[in-house]
Amino acid sequence: MTVSSYSPADPGDLVVRVEAAGAAGTAAAVERARAAQPGWRGAGAAARSAALTHAAEAVEAHAGELAALIVREVGKPLAEARGEVARTAAIWRYYAQAPYAPSGAAHEPAAGEGLLLTRRRPYGVAGLITPWNFPLAIPTWKAAPALAVGNTVVLKPAPEGTACALRLAELAGLPAGVLTVVPGGAAEGGALVAAADVVSFTGSTAVGQAVVAAATGRGIPVQAEMGGLNAAVVLPDADLGQAAAHLAAAIAGYAGQKCTATSRVIAVGSAYEPLAEALVKALGATPAGDPGDPATVCGPVIGEAALTRLTGAIGSARAAGAEVLTGGARVDRPGWFVEPTLLAGVPAEHPLLVEEFFGPVAVLLPAAYLDEAVALANGTRHSLAASVHTRDLDTALAAADRLDAGMIRINAPSSGVDFHLPFGGTKSASHGAREQGQAVLDFFTASRTVTLLPAGTAR
Ligand code: NAD
């Protein structure tokens, strides 16, 4: 079996074709990683820190090449692709400090003499399964913390991001067995979950739930970051021009293919009419186009199936009485381009308001008051991110307190969060520990409690 990855902006362009690892090859990669792990952990904090710093430097030294590869392989517009490369280097650098952090603490015994220690240690082999939409940053934000605390890593990237993952591992230049990429799809992903000591997954909800069930069945720790159906709440007192610009970026940026993209815009009270007008204008200013052009905001969607699913959903919403305020069609050019689209009057039970569609499409919804807006926003299982647009601090804080989403941004697009802060959602959007920051370093290690008594203590 082979894995082939084609450019979504130019589907005739084969970016890479490689042999799939297969289930047996994946299991063998895990065994090599297991054999390499004691040496990697035993090399010490300075060696691991230096290796991660080297990876950051290699990414920086090849920034132009990597950005071009992201544009070509997954159709991310150039400006965002450059941003992803810079973020990738920053993540390696951030976690390069982690090997020096304390790995435990000393405690007082509840009674008597002695010393209690808690100490965290790596599990062994971290199995990482990643999506295509951040083909350098997501593999890095899982691999760097796993490696920093002494695990070795086997990475199973999405087939559509294979070339990016292979180049990242090559540039990182880690010792043999420390970071291995296994190209493939579901079979390799399943084999990795069956053999790894700890699993971190990012991708769609259905696959994530299956991965969680399989890992939990084996009794190994697992975290999963899955899809979002993210809402933006716009109050009448907001700077509506600014809100519309932020929303257009969150709806159309990278053709809406971020787990934190906005797909539901909830306009409160008198905000509805002026916001609809401003948003139609802002989306009209971000047409779908060549991802290699530094001015492009909205590139192609990842493939033909994604395009068909999106245009089908827009068509069925129309048939159910929805109004297309802007966009709504495939762009007449080679590649998988959909116009940035805003719909109104979509029935509540329509799939566009129930499932994640991962495209440059949003639904505008009215709400009489903030309470109703919060109830609408929370009326989903996919509560990953949300944004609130208002000039009033009390309203902002009240909304932030009551929204279910794991990441809430005030007067900013729903998409985007700093890489050193906890990342994740609630309900079906996430399972297990948060990614990023300290939370993920804890996830990739197990705590052990050690009791030391003076020799000869009678107890
Ligand atoms: P996907 O679920 O199709 O694939 C994700 C990964 O799982 C791929 O590597 C795939 O090959 C692998 N896989 C598929 N079937 C498997 C199986 N049965 N067992 C083990 N592994 C299997 O998702 P995708 O299309 O690559 O990515 C888009 C999705 O990712 C969207 O739903 C998006 O919301 C989500 N995403 C979430 C976050 C987040 O942090 N919440 C971030 C980025 C993307």
Image (cartoon, helix red, strand yellow):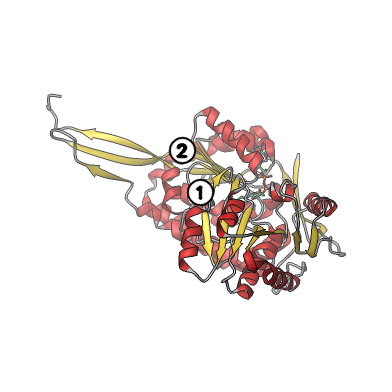
Locate residue 435 relative to residue 136 in the image: left or right. left
Q: Is mark 2 within 8 Å of ligand 1?
A: no
State whether residue 114 is above or below residue 5: above
In this rendering, the label closer to the viewer, 2 or 1: 2
* Residue 213 spot, x, y in % from top left: 58, 32
Query: For the residues marked 2 and 1, what is the alpha-carbon distance in whole angstroms?
Result: 16 Å
* Viewer-nearest residue: 358 or 314: 314
**Count of numbered labels shown in the rendering:** 2
On the image, which quarter does residue 237 sit in? bottom right
Locate residue 201 relative to residue 12 in the image: left or right. left
The disc, 2 or 1, on the residue closer to the chain's N-terminal end is 2
The residue shown at (68%, 35%) is: 187
* Residue 276 spot, x, y in % from top left: 71, 68
* Viewer-nearest residue: 435 or 195: 435
Residue at which label 1 appears: 175
Quarter of the image with the N terminus in it: top right
Quarter of the image with the C terminus in it: top left
| Structural crowding at the residue carrying mark 1, measured as other residues with C-alpha within 10 Å and reported as few (<14), some (14–19) or many (≥20) | few
